[in-house]
Every structure is written in structure tokens, then in C-alpha cells.
């Protein structure tokens, strides 16, 4: 089952309830380098911006789109991509309710198969005849993500077509869209790229072969981008939102072939300690606006 919502991310202090055997902590606190107070990665959102979010029909993507767009100045353009047209319209209505002075464009698109030509067309149409240099900030949040087949073990994953489909949506189209976006807005002085990532890109978790492999490939792509474009006005943040109450974590709790994973999410829900989309979005904006990262860093919800 593919769920076009943002991830789960850090399994913090995952303990098996019967054996008390500790599993690897899905938190990036030991891997992230905290920048000095003089960092220049702080982003001013209170300006005229072009803002694109994928997987924006629900979950973390929708909440990030709403709360970030709330801060933009009049004349900003917000573009929402996902497969669910009704979900996108719901997000659009919520954005306009908190900030009626922005233009919100929605596009129902299957990012598993979207071509470069289609993605460029979406960008072009969203602008109309507006020049790109009217924006002070161009920001894209690559939130789209699917968990993949979690009922089979790695040893049984011999379906090449399934691999290609998974990487098509979660890695290939993400990279192509990112290139189209940065090429289109190269004249904008501040360009911000946000990749919604997971500790699963660093640590193996049973039943999550596709997810771990895809997140690893995706994050390394963005880390290379940060290195190569360090002097080009491009800032990259890999944000890991923590274990959030989304359809993806519901799917993991119900169908993971690993009992520890199922028990972990059940315990979070039973104890109401699973994070909400409001909580992780607030932390994301705090990190972003205060520059609590270096470009290319993997920053986890629990790091700050």
C-alpha cells in the first residue's frame, strides 16, 4: 500500500515490551552538527515567496503548507502537489483561511510517473506571467513519501518492477522536480530546499527495506546538493519529523512483519505520546527561522 504522506521518522527509545531488548534509537541527536550562533541559515519567511509542497493533501505535508504559508507576505504563490484533488482543495481552503493574501495553486499529479516536461509545465502555469525575480524566497518541501511493502523481508524482494515503482516516486521524481525547481528560480536570491527524511536513512529497521533504502538514497542526493551549491544561495535542510500520527504510522502498526515495530506504534498510541502534525511543524519552523542547522544537515525533531 502506498500512502502519499510524510514519514514516520525517529523511533525514540524503542524497547521490546517483553524482552526489554533495546533497538537502535531512531533519533539524529548523535549525528547532527549544531551550528554556531553566527549561522546564516536562518530563513525569513515574512516576505514575498514562491512555495511548493509535495504530498500536501494531508498529514505533515498539509500542516507544513498551512503553517508556513501563514507567514508569507501578500503576493506570494503557494503550489500544492499530491494525487488527491479533494485533499489538496481542503489544504488550499485552510491556507486561504489563515492568509487570504496569497495565491494557492493545486495540481493533482502522480509523482511516481511525472515527467520533467509535466513538472516544468506545473511550475510555468503556477507563475502565470509573473517574473521569478519578484520573489525574495523560493522554497520547496519534498514531503511526498511512501512506506513501501512492509509485509515482506529484504530477502524476498525480488520484484524489479516494484523496486522501480518505489524509487520512481520516492527518489527519481524528487530529484527531477528539485532540478526543475532550482533551474526555474535560479534568479531568486534565497533558495530553500527541505527534504522530509527519517532516521531510517541511517539505521536499518526490519520490514522497512524499501523505506530505508529510499530515504538513504534521497538524503545523500540532498547532502551532495548542499555541498555542490554552497555558494549559490541554496540552503538545504533534511528534517526528520519524529514519530507522527499519520496514515503511514497506522500502516506500520497494522502490517509490519516485525513485531517490535508494531508494538512500538501501538505503545505510542496507547500512551498518547505519538507526536501530532502541529508539534512537528512548530519544531520545523523554529529550526528553520532560527537557523539551527548547517546546510545539508540531518536534523531530528528531538535535536532541539
Image: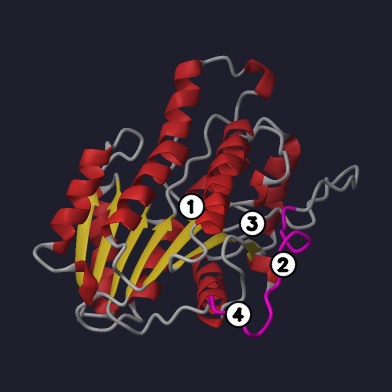
In front of the other: label 2 or label 1? 2
**Residue in the image at 71% along x and 39% along y:** 205
The mark nearer the N terminus, 3 or 1, is 1
Dot 4 corresponds to which residue?
39
Residue 148 in magenta stretch: no
Q: Which residues are magenta?
A: 26-41
Q: Secondary structure at mark 1?
A: loop
* Other-residue count near label 1 (Cα within 10 Å), few / some / many at <14 / 14–19 / ≥20: many
| Discs 3, 2 touching: Cβ within 8 Å | no
Dot 3 corresponds to which residue?
269
In the displayed structure, 93 sits above or below 83; it is below
| Discs 2, 1 touching: Cβ within 8 Å | no
What numbered label is drawn on residue 6?
1
Looking at the picture, the colour scheme in use is: secondary structure
- Label 3 to label 1, Cα distance in Å? 18 Å
49 horizontally vs 160: left or right: left
In the displayed structure, 71 sits above or below 231; it is below
In front of the other: label 3 or label 2? 2
The mark nearer the N terminus, 4 or 2, is 2
Residue 29 in magenta stretch: yes
- In front of the other: 227 or 192: 227
- Label 4 to label 1, Cα distance in Å? 28 Å
Amino acid at each position: 500500500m502506498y500512502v502519499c504522506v510524510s514519514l514516520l521518522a525517529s523511533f525514540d527509545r524503542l524497547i521490546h515490551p517483553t524482552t526489554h531488548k533495546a533497538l537502535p534509537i531512531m533519533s539524529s541527536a548523535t549525528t547532527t552538527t549544531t551550528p554556531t550562533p553566527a549561522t546564516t541559515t536562518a530563513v525569513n519567511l515574512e516576505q514575498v515567496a514562491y512555495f511548493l509542497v509535495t504530498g500536501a493533501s494531508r498529514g505533515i505535508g498539509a500542516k507544513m503548507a498551512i503553517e508556513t504559508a501563514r507567514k508569507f507576505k501578500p503576493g506570494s504563490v503557494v503550489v500544492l502537489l499530491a494525487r488527491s484533488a479533494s485533499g489538496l482543495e481542503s489544504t488550499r481552503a485552510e491556507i486561504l483561511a489563515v492568509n487570504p493574501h496569497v495565491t494557492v495553486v493545486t495540481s493533482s499529479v502522480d509523482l511516481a510517473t511525472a515527467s520533467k516536461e509535466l513538472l516544468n509545465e506545473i511550475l510555468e502555469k503556477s507563475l502565470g506571467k509573473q517574473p521569478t525575480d519578484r520573489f525574495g524566497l523560493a522554497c520547496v518541501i519534498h514531503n511526498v513519501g511512501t512506506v513501501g511493502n512492509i509485509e515482506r523481508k529484504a530477502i524476498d524482494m525480488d520484484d524489479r518492477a516494484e523496486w522501480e515503482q518505489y524509487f520512481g516516486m520516492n527518489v527519481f521524481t524528487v530529484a527531477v522536480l528539485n532540478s526543475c525547481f532550482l533551474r526555474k528560480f535560479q534568479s531568486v536570491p534565497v533558495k530553500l530546499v527541505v527534504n522530509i527524511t527519517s532516521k531510517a536513512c541511517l539505521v536499518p529497521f526490519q520490514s522497512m527495506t524499501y523505506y530505508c533504502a529510499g530515504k538513504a538514497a534521497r538524503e545523500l542526493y540532498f547532502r551532495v546538493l548542499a555541498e555542490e551549491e554552497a555558494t549559490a544561495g541554496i540552503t538545504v535542510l533534511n528534517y526528520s519529523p519524529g514519530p507522527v500520527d499519520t496514515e503511514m504510522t497506522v500502516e506500520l502498526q497494522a502490517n509490519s512483519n516485525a513485531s517490535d515495530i508494531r508494538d512500538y506504534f501501538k505503545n505510542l498510541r496507547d500512551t498518547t505520546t505519538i507526536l501530532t502534525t502541529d508539534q512537528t511543524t512548530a519544531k520545523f519552523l523554529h529550526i528553520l527561522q532560527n537557523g539551527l542547522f548547517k546546510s545539508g544537515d540531518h536534523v531530528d525533531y528531538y535535536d532541539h
